[in-house]
Amino acid sequence: MLFVLIGLWTIGLLLLITDPKRSTTRWIASIAFTGGAGALSAVIHDHFTPYLLERQLLNDTVMIALGAAESASSLVCYYGLPYTFLMFCVIYHPQAAQWRWKRALTWILLVPAGLSFAFEPEAGRPIPYHFVTYWTVPYILLGIGLLLHAAFKERNSFLRKHRMLTTLAAAPTLFFAVFTLYVLPTFFGLYESWRYNALVIGFTLAVILFSSFRYGFMGLQISIHNQKLDYTLRAITSGTAILNHAIKNDVGKIRLFSEKIKSEAGRNDPAQLIDDIDVIMNASQHIYDMIYRIQGQTQEIDIRPEPLELGPLLERCITMLEPALADISVVKEFHSEGRMSGDRAQLVEVLTNVMTNAIEAMPHGGTLTVKLTETKRNLVVEIKDTGSGMDKKQQKRVFDPFYTTKSGKKLNFGLGLSYCYAIVQKHKGSMELHSQPGHGTSVFINFLKRKGGAAI
């Protein structure tokens, strides 16, 4: 049980260090600590007490203290684990923001645990099983049901993956604990079955470790590759490289719309010509904004945040790329206005970069899907194409500076996604890419929602 104690409490501490202000992080850390308390009780009983006894260090005072610590740790696990698990599942549910009663529920769900102290356990037993089982089992089963419901009802595929990983990490272990901690001792007299929990807890720790390295778990991301990328980006986000990339993109837009104006000049449609000229003027203004924001070759990118809405920003980016969308159908799914605080010019550059990559991945036509969804704290932009996709080797390098899969493009410097990654990081967001050969590519960009105030 020692490795269970160390593993659970280490995960709990890492989660709190990573994001202590988020309520879901605090509750899942509480699950780790209450579960680890049960392991602590076993360590005291199986290892620490015999160790002191063997060395004749176990006097009456120490024995009483150890007995109290063992009993307290055991109660924290038996009563605290179902409570913290259910509270986490309630707060973690995507509809939790709409549940006005969840604050009161924090206290209401403590009542059965408090009442449990009014019942006397049988001699030699840690808890009054015949009372405790009838509230702890429903708590755990209801929590598992909420996790499954949240995972299957999640509309965003990126968030659904994370919810499924969270469910995989928590549900099997807690379901197993229903039997080993409560059902088997209560109805079959098997009081030592809890020792088998170490096996399934090992599975849980493996899932958390794997998902932390690969995808991130509840905000906990252990990725040597990302740390290496962060340091590398500081060296390459100098004025000259980023400015060249920004100019290349906007010059491309000016060229596309100039050709469109030329082809439409004979059709005598002044309104359409004015719209196209506006796009060219916006692209020119964007070049100016980018030049103004790059503060020098060795300085980092300057972010100038302002209240804005991502929905209209995405619409503007799609409009700017209209000439390149002749053979591509665009699907827009905006389930949020997307209010946030960000640098308008930089975010336009990021979104048009990602959309341009998606368009270039479909040279023979296809479907460009642009989604905007939100959670309690985040806004999620998904830009998906139906192109040829990428293999795992390409995906591992896609955010590397100067890496590109577009070898035939003379003006492509391989700075696009590196630049986008840097800008998103500057906005305290995250960016991930998922792709399979033959099944297209999806890019997910997460931003923090704006707290209060109207977006412009």
Image (spheres, rainbow, N blue to C red):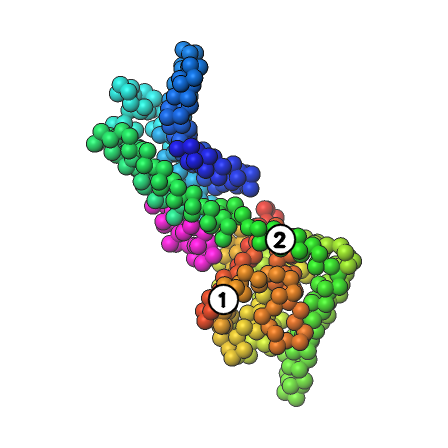
**Residue at point 46% right, 54% down?**
159
Secondary structure mainly formed by the magenta segment:
helix
**Residue at point 40% right, 11% down?**
60
Is residue 154 highlighted in magenta? Answer: yes
Residue type indicated by callout 1 = Asp
Asked which secondary structure carries label 1, the reply is: loop
**115 left or right of 103?**
left
Say above or below: 403 vs 95.
Answer: below
Q: Which residues are magenta?
A: 142-165
The quarter of the image holding the C terminus is: bottom right
The quarter of the image holding the N terminus is: top left
Q: Which residue is mark 1?
A: 391
**Residue at point 39% right, 30% down?**
38
**206 left or right of 378?**
left
The percent position of residue 291, horizontal first and vertical second, equals 76, 63
Residue at the bottom extreme of this rendering: 266
Say above or below: 402 vs 340.
Answer: below
Residue type indicated by callout 2 = Lys
Quarter of the image where one finds residue 400: bottom right
Asked which secondary structure carries label 2, the reply is: helix
Residue at the right extreme of this rendering: 296
Residue at the top extreme of this rendering: 60
Say above or below: 416 vs 228.
Answer: below
Q: Of 282 and 401, which appears nearest the observer?
A: 401
**Residue at point 61% right, 77% down?**
408
Q: Which residue is mark 2?
A: 228
Question: Circle 1: is it few (<14), some (14-19), or many (20+) Cα within 10 Å?
Answer: few
